[in-house]
Image (tube, rainbow, N blue to C red):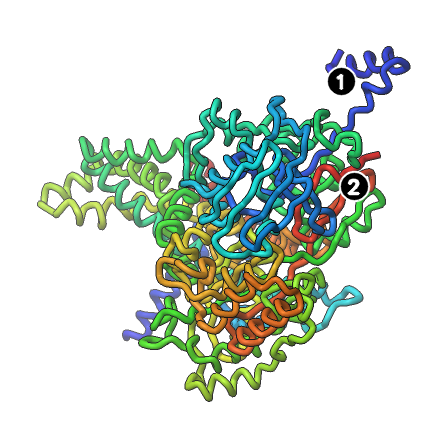
Amino acid sequence: MPMNKETGRKMSLIVRILDSDIWYSFTRSKVTMIAALITFLIFASALFAPIISPHNPFDLASLSLMDSLLPPAWSAEGDPNYLLGTDDQGRDVLSTILYGSRISLAVGLVSVAFAAVLGITLGLIAGYMGGRVDAIIMRIADVQLSFPAILIALLIAGTVNALADGMDRERSAFTVLIISIGLSFWVQYARTVRSSTLVERNKEYVQAARLIGLHPFLIMLRHVLPNVMGPVLVIATINLALAVITEATLSFLGVGIPGTQPSLGTMIRTGNDFLFSGEWWITLFPGAMLAILVLAVNLLGDWLRDALNPKLR
Amino acid sequence: MSKFGRFLAASALMGAFATSAMAEKSFDYAFQGSLKSLDPYTLRETFTLGILTNVYEGLIKRGPNLEILPGLADSWEVIEPTRWRFHLRKGVKFHNGNDFTAEDVVFSAERLNSEGSDMKGRVPSDATFEIVDDYTVDFILASPNPILHYEWELWSIIDKDWAETNDSVRVTSASDTAETPISMMANGTGPFKITEHTAGVNTKFEANENWWNWENREFNIDKVNFTSISADATRVAALLSGEMDMVYPVPTQDIKRINSSSTLAALTGPELRTIFLGMDQRRDELLNSSVKGKNPFKDIRVRQAFFHAINAEAISSRIMRKQAAPSALMISPFLFDNADQFERLAYDPDKAKALLTEAGYPDGFEIRIDCPNDRYVNDESICQAVAAMMAKVGIKVNVNAQPKAQYFAKILASGGYETSFYLLGWTPGSLDSHNIFANLYGCRDDAGKGGMFNIGGYCNPEVDALAKEILVENDAAKRLDLVTQAYKIVTDEVGYLPLHQQGLAWGVSKDVSVAQRADNVLRFEHITKN
């Protein structure tokens, strides 16, 4: 019966996961489980920010300047309406963090996806084709590797913002950030995928596929790609943390998300101006949130790297 | 032994004999902006002109309260309404030892109006000059101008011989990329000489013992080091750590922190600069707006609605932390005696909505505001607050905040006035209302002929006619009456949305005493240090 078959397949998937080495190593590492829980909570709160956050900091009409710079609720001058206080425009810090981490995570995820797709494609082509194509792609990658990623991202974001002067920054900032972060991170994927592809392409199954006349594109996509995905997954996880940090850095430097729809980095930049004047909450809470998020994702990435490394088993 | 150790040992040995030599006093300070070219005609910006007049001097001077004092001119008289005679100070020497004479004044006046100068018009371009003798010079004007000398404190007199021998007759323009001799060294008559200059970074000054007023000097410092620190937090940190004797401007939020220190004080006071919003009343269709085919700002009801929607009190109390005074006019009340007859349109969102509905925009519209983010105190925050206030009456304002270099390049005449809603600040250089009517309210064409800084293109021929009358009116009471009439028209028509006069805030070590001028200019000659 189709129903049974379906549940059976689902069962077997769960069983397969529970039975796997990865799950085993996951359950043995308390740190990883805590990191996963925190990551999950942050993702969930970012996703449901419009529902759970007490205010909507992006709705300008709801802001009141007279409520600006209120300290957190537990201090003497605090207002229970604003648990973590308000910033200089009267935005609720807690709500802004929730909405801001939403932007930070969205930029991180999309730019990692962009970098991964670009890097995997170029890496597969370079590794599989070899020769001149390989040389050109990998030399470009080498050149780019000699610059720090943040510098490249800054260069792209800065140039685009300066060139596209008439553009609406509130709308374009997101795209510009994704492109600049994505372009600065693709090299790692390309290198990893290329080296794995070089190994895989000489194996019998690829040669067999070639013998029966499959198009090289299909061979790369269906046969080589699934076998090189392991390391890519590890890089992607660690890069997510890096991308979030890069976004925060760019926003902190003023070329990222503009102040009207702040991301975590923008909030830290705004708060930085108030450090000497005693309004510590504007920068401390978003900073702590950023640190926790990056730490949790990094721990997950580290664990994944160890779990997928056959030499460590 | 370290250098410092050796220095200590040496000073211990010489201590008893060398007290007078040891007493050299140096004053270190930092400002938000930077000093690029030393040519005093390159850039018409209060800070650059102000710092250079410690080295160069004008025919007149202004004191700590901006009162007009004799400078390089001992005295002056208006012989006929169109002929002014200046009697120059005798015995004044430039830093290189050359004598200061009438020739230098005429040379400077001609150079001021030459190609590349940003100071054109500070001496009327149709004026001619007559050297009566070495120490007397006549200015012959095309039309009477009772406030001819008002802006001359910041018009530096340059040595003719020195400029000619150093290839510096041509003015270094702001767009010049190559260094010229006069952009890298200075030869003035003032109380301080420049000993070292790194463009955009720091500049070192030394007291000039041959200054004409040396015997009556008020200052007791021998050296001044100026450094540019653009980041607010870094500038404040430099003061808190004792590295600097003074920094300015102090960000409004840090005034309390500085005042709470036992060794520092924040000097605050009203500045003459008015911060305001301008609206495009010239184009037939606004830039970056959802309204197509017409210009809502041409409707006075829309302009009134914008005025009613802005809560200037909240901006000055929260964003400016009371370091600003809400203003009904485009000029500081210190510069206009009848300012108390004018009042801001009340903050009233409901009325604003009603006016918008009446004007045919019941659901509001969308528009972009162009805004600098490193020019005025809290400029970007003000724009964001304006956006929030406008949202309450249904107007969606998109904030486009940019560094001042990009911002000014776009919105001024040279950029084709590329904005339909903007934030700007203005200090009348002459400290007089005529400057406001000529520059901010005068009708202009697309190229900027007329009111060159009238970016929104407000135009009322009646105001232009009054401005002409104001310029030539010699009777103070009549003149005040004309000025009041003109302000009445422009405020009734809501040509601009004035916000406030921003406050000055200088962070100063308690060891030094300085004179804070309302135009934010720091004069080294009023500095004493314990």
Considering depth in this image, is B106 or A63 the residue closer to the camera? B106
Query: Can residue B234 be seen in this snapshot?
Result: no
**How many numbered markers are drawn?**
2
Residue at image location 45% in from the left, 61% down from the top: B451
Q: Is residue B234 left or right of residue B260?
A: left
Disc 1 and disc 2: Cα gap in Å? 24 Å
Looking at the image, which residue is at 55% across and 49% down?
B83
Q: Position of residue B147 (x, y in %)?
A: 59, 55
Residue designated by label 1? B4
Q: Count neighbours of disc 2 (C-alpha within 10 A) and say few if under 14, some if 14 to 19, many if 20 or more.
A: many
A194 with respect to A304 (left or right): left
Is residue A242 something that shows in the picture?
A: yes
Q: Residue at x 48, y 84 (%)?
A: B356
Image quadrant containing the C terminus of chain B: top right
Image: A145 above or below A111: above
In the depicted structure, whether residue B469 falls above or below residue B36: below
Camera-nearest residue between B354 and B530: B530
Report the quarter where the N terminus of chain B lies: top right
- Residue in the foreground of this view, choosing between A304 and B526: B526
The chain identifier of the residue carrying mark 1 reads B
Give the labeled residue for mark 2: B509
Q: Residue at 61% of width from left, 59% of height from top?
A: B432
Mark 1: few/some/many CA within 10 Å (<14, 14-19, 20+)? few
Is A64 on the left-hand or right-hand side of A258?
right
Q: Mark 1 or mark 2, which has the lower sequence index?
A: 1
Whether callout 1 and callout 2 share a subunit is answered yes
Query: Under tag 2, what secondary structure?
Result: strand
Disc 2 residue type?
Answer: Ser
Tell me the element at label 1.
helix
- Return the x and y of residue A299 as percentages of the image width and height: 54, 46
